Amino acid sequence: MIPASPEFPALTDADIARLEQLLDAVPAPCQPLDVSALDGYLCGVLLQPAPVPAGRWQPRITDLEGRPAPPGAALDETLALARRRHAELDRAIGQRQWFDPWVFQLDDDAAPEQALLPWVAGFAAALDVHGDLLALGDPALVEPMALLYAHFDPDDLEDADALLEVIATLEPPADLAEAVQDCVRAVMLIADVTRPRRQPAAARPRPQRRPQRR
């Protein structure tokens, strides 16, 4: 369990329901994220190799195009809740600790891939806007990206041959719990590339002292 920050306490179920209500109430023409997509979007933001300023990631919450939220959108409250979740996920990813993605069972007959699709769509939206992660081109990213993008229709993955090859080898998750576990594992594997943890001081090799010239 990740300890909550006094400044950014973890969101309760009531907070999540309130955030969902606020996002649903954002008026047209804005196209806000839903809460599941927002959660995936925040992970995509936090997995970038360099921190993304709030002024760049926040506008996409209430509109995918980044247009200003119109009056009446309760913007301050919406962003305050989003910042708390951002901080909660940041702590979990930084410490490589489990977190519960905001993934919801659609109905009893829905496949696990369908339930996770909104979350992955939000993650992909973050990478479309903030492209530094994909620009790395690190081979170690292929497996975790495949775990996430396997939830998309293969026809939607253009020019992604390496990704499709790995996706073809994956077994579909047996249930939603397994799909969620794969999602969190993928996030942590990506973090190992873009946000490597520092070695403890005792484990770091000591620098060799140069011989003094006489």
Image: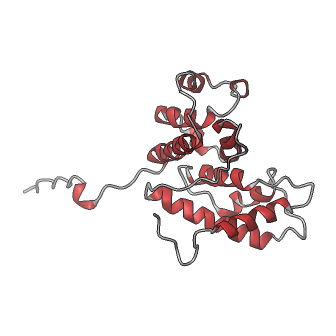
**Residue at left offset 47%, top offset 70%:** 3
Residue 128: image location, x then y, percent:
70, 42
Quadrant in which the N terminus is drawn = bottom left
Looking at the image, residue 7 sits to the left or right of residue 198; the answer is: right
* Image mark count: 0
Looking at the image, residue 196 sits to the left or right of residue 17; the answer is: left
Residue 87 vertical position relative to residue 108 in the rendered view, above or below: below
Residue 161: image location, x then y, percent:
60, 21
**Residue at left offset 68%, top offset 25%:** 154
Q: How is the image coloured?
A: secondary structure
Front one among 56 and 92: 92
Outermost residue, bottom side: 6
Quadrant in which the C terminus is drawn = bottom left
Outermost residue, front side: 108
**Residue at left offset 53%, top offset 60%:** 90
Residue 23: image location, x then y, percent:
80, 61
Looking at the image, residue 206 sits to the left or right of residue 34; the answer is: left
Q: Residue 133, located in which quarter of the rendered image?
A: top right
Outermost residue, left side: 214
Residue 122 vertical position relative to residue 53 in the rendered view, above or below: above
Front one among 190 and 21: 21
Q: Residue 14, located in which quarter of the rendered image?
A: bottom right
Residue 43: image location, x then y, percent:
60, 52
